[in-house]
């Protein structure tokens, strides 16, 4: 049915063009004189151009899209280059190029749509560039480029969508966080210390199976020679080496700052040689074990780049119902934008497991604590729970006063 309607429209437009040509011809024949014939002969090339536009194949176009880099983080600017090619050098009056992109990519940019009008003439290759000012975090898809052209009178308008697939992953922004371990304790005995978090490689206590992220220097070559299986040395560890970050993905205006804070903390912990894990609680619960190394870091960043605020349940309910699997020696950091009595009670039960637990309450820049939040903060302090309020833009000093929180 649609094809029949399109055929009818084309025939109607051709008839309109013939009528216009006939009107100018009749006018010239009956009126006579230079002006009338000049009008007729001037109309003829435009009419022929319109006729040729109606049969010109837009399928002749090909499109290539490229980026200067594929490694971006939230807030960066990006330049997109488009190369439009065609084989037939037909003189087009204009072409409207519209890059079909996920609307989410223009969330923060002043450039709201990748659309431009160009005047190709006889050119077979056209180069276009546009810049997106401030990239938002997430996975963004470039699916195709829509091209539209027409004649001088607007009678014939043709459009084609040329597939051109690209996927861009924008990682969360990072802030330089000065990480300070909340507590450092050896397996044998208890001792408060602020030493740099490292494995004590002078005290090997055994061997274990090699895991990605283990250092090459830790391989136990004698075991490898006997069993032909890679084993690594186990060392004396401080209990506060490992850090598990729990990200609350409940919808909130402060969700993007929460992701930035989480990424920054993980980066700081891994940079200092510690092992870090992530529990992302949302519509799906994604868990990353306590590990170190660049590959593990890439996996964490990849998840944080795509993560969405899609949790349907309160964090306290999830923690109380399913619990968190972690080593008792690990420090647990809860990153959330809301606090409740139930969450404080749940955190207190975790704190009794001989582990360090701290709640980071993330607030947007300029936001203020409500009276209820102030009361809950005092309640948490009264029960011996560390609750630190961190504002967007001040994440760098998040650990400077944790013990005083």
Image (cartoon, grey):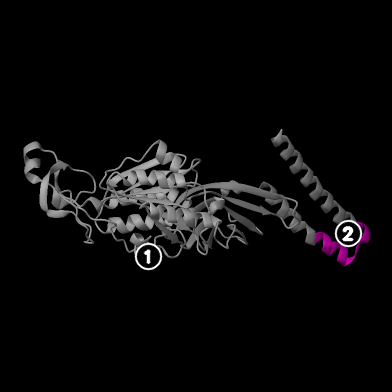
As drawn, the label of residue 28 is: 2
Question: Which residue is at 52% across, 54% downward?
Answer: 372
At 43% across and 60% down in the image, what residue appears?
390
Bounds of the magenta segment: 29-41
Depth check, mark 1 against mark 2: the one in front is 1
Q: Is 2 left, or right, of 391 in this rendering?
A: right
User: Which quadrant holds residue 44?
Assistant: bottom right
The picture places residue 276, in percent across and down from the top left corner, at 30, 50
Disc 2 crowd rating (10 Å Cα; few below 14, some 14-19, many 20+) is some
Tag 1, which secondary structure?
helix
Quadrant location of the N terminus in the rendered image: top right
Q: Residue furthest top?
A: 1
Q: Nearer the viewer, residue 43 or 101?
A: 101
Residue 43 location (% of width, % of height) = 79, 59
In three-dimensional space, the C-alpha distance between marks 1 and 2, rounded to whole angstroms, equals 84 Å
Residue 14 image point, x, y percent: 77, 46
Secondary structure type for disc 2: helix
Answer yes or no: is residue 27 visible.
Answer: yes
Q: Is residue 36 left or right of residue 68?
A: right
In the figure, is residue 134 to the left or right of 289?
right
Is residue 171 visible in this depiction of the protein?
no
User: What residue is disc 1 on?
Assistant: 397
């Amino acid at each position: 049915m649609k094809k029949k309607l399109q055929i009818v429209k084309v025939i109607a437009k051709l008839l309109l063009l013939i009528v216009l040509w006939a009107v100018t011809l009749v006018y010239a024949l009956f009126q006579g004189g230079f002006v009338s014939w000049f009008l007729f002969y001037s109309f003829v090339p435009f009419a022929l151009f319109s006729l040729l536009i109606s049969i010109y194949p837009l399928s002749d176009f090909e499109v290539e899209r490229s980026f200067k880099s594929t490694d971006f983080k939230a807030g960066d600017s990006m330049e997109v280059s488009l190369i439009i090619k065609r084989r037939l050098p037909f003189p087009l009056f204009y072409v409207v190029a519209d890059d079909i992109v996920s609307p989410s990519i223009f969330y923060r940019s002043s450039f709201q749509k990748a659309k431009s009008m160009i005047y190709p003439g006889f050119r077979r290759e056209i180069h276009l560039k546009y810049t997106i000012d401030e990239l938002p975090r997430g996975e963004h898809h470039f699916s195709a480029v829509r091209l539209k052209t027409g004649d001088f009178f607007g009678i014939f308008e043709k459009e084609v969508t040329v597939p051109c697939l690209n996927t861009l992953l924008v990682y969360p922004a990072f802030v330089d966080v000065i990480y300070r371990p909340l507590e450092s304790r050896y397996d044998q005995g208890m001792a408060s210390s602020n030493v740099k978090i490292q494995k004590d490689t002078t005290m090997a206590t055994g061997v274990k199976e090699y895991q990605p992220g283990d250092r090459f220097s830790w391989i136990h070559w004698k075991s490898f020679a006997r069993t032909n299986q890679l084993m690594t040395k186990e060392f004396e560890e401080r209990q506060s080496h490992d850090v598990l970050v729990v990200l609350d993905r409940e919808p909130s205006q402060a969700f993007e700052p929460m992701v930035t804070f989480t990424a920054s903390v993980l980066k700081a912990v891994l940079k200092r040689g510690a092992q870090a894990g992530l529990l992302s609680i949302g519509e799906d619960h994604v868990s990353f074990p306590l590990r170190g190394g660049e590959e593990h870091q890439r996996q964490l960043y990849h998840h944080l780049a795509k993560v969405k605020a899609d949790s349907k349940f309160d964090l306290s309910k999830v923690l109380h119902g399913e619990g968190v699997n972690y080593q008792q020696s690990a420090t647990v950091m809860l990153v959330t934008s809301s606090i409740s009595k139930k969450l404080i009670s749940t955190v207190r039960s975790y704190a009794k497991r001989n582990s360090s637990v701290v709640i980071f309450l993330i607030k947007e820049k300029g936001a203020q604590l409500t009276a209820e939040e102030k009361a809950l903060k005092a309640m948490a302090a009264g029960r011996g729970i560390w609750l630190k309020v961190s504002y967007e833009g001040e994440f760098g000093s998040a650990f400077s006063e944790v013990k005083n929180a």
